[in-house]
Amino acid sequence: MTGTGRPGSTVSGGRTHWGTVYPGFSFSATLGKFVHGGLCLSTAPCGTKVMVEGGIPGELVEVEVQTHRAHTWFGRVKSVSDPSPDRVPPPCPYVPECGGCQLQHIAYERQFQLKVEAVVEQLGRQGITLTPSQMGLFPALDPWRYRWRGEFHVLRSESGARLGFNRARSWTPIAVQDCLIHHRAITEALPELEQIAAAARDATVLHLTVGAGGKELLLATKPARALKEADLSLQERALPAGVNWSNSTTSLEWRGHSYRVSPESFIQVNREMMEQLYGCILTQLGDMGGCTVIDAYAGIGVLAVELAGSGSRVICIEENPAAARMGRLNMELNGVEGEVEFIRASVDDVLSSLLSQHNPDAVLVDPPRAGCSSKVVAALALAGPARIVYVSCDPATLARDLRLLCVSGPYRLSYLAKVDMFPQTWHVECVATLVRE
């Protein structure tokens, strides 16, 4: 019979649905390709496309439809009839309820391969192709215990406070006793951190950073004032052997240099893969001795110190006030303040004028997940240098920007590296080298 809700809908079994697909509807399907976001494509019997989590391409599974948004249906694997040889039991007891990891059911080697394919697919959609010789692959050195920074939500009850992460597809947290992708200095401190969270009654989030080579735990709360409510005799509280507390800053070491880090400043959370990522960036910039480099979205200045130490003049742009403050301090701590100009401003606001003023030999851009704004892309296309190294944590926005710079603009994509900074999740870091033609 015809429904009275959405035009073209029908009623079956007391439910209004559209095209015979509705939340709770199940069907069998062989899963198609893996796409950006950690999902596999499937097709319901009526022909409707459904994006499925928890699967591996080629598997025969039963799909349960769950939600519909932005003209797309989403579902999950309800059962597996013909599993992939790459399917493994997730070692974490909170999978799939916890939303932190999406790929623990896939053997790591296959995880990385699928993420590489998803990047290539995103670029291909924008008309960008690369030969194998133009691509670099950097799988994780260790797919577990790699996060040196994390945010834990506070769950309160009459008995006290617990810490955890948001559930999959939900803003409601789930309490955890361990997390297999976080550094042990964080997870072994969870019992003590729960006591601190209970005392800091206004705290909604505990923000944790491991520093000093794994020997220090930097603690902050959201809101920041909540930390003052707790009994903060931190040095008297138990921590894993050899680890000390901090509630102000901590240190990060890389290539013989030391950097101060605050809770508000950005850092790469996978410390073991910093050499692979930053080393790749420096290799792609090439010998910049005696050259001028603009480091847009410079953070706390890790790469700026390395470039300045090799003889480059570096202009850093950083909008976040805490990161800019730490960046200036780090230039002084490492003795390169004379070679580095640190500008606290939005890249959108100052890049065009800096390109005109300094005529740099190279620009390094490492924007947030949203990618570069149209204003930044336009400035690079019109007055950019001979070389751009673009670091991206989102292949979709990277592909969008590369289309404007390379397909429609004056640059050629000469190299693309995929660096797996986030095993067990669908996220992947990319380093793209653009040469002006």
Image (cartoon, rainbow, N blue to C red):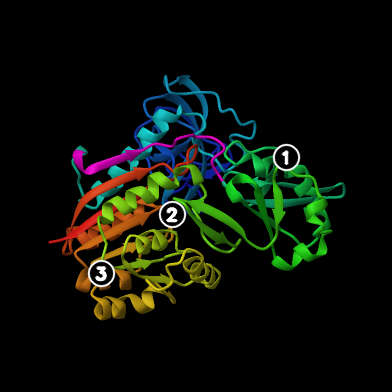
Q: Residue furthest right?
A: 158
Q: Residue furthest front?
A: 335
Q: Residue at x 20, y 53 (%)?
A: 413
> Which numbered tag is attached to residue 380?
3
- The answer to whether residue 43 shows anywhere in this view is no
Q: Report the magenta residues as a range.
A: 133-147
Residue 112 position (above or below residue 347): above
Sequence-earlier tag: 2 or 3: 2
Q: Position of residue 188 (x, y in %)?
A: 71, 39
SS for tag 2? loop
The residue that label 1 is drawn on is 241
SS for tag 1? loop
- Whether residue 143 appears in magenta in the rendering, the answer is yes
- The answer to whether residue 147 shows anywhere in this view is yes
CB contact under 8 Å: marks 1 and 3: no
Residue 400 located left or right of residue 165: left
Residue 252 located left or right of residue 122: right
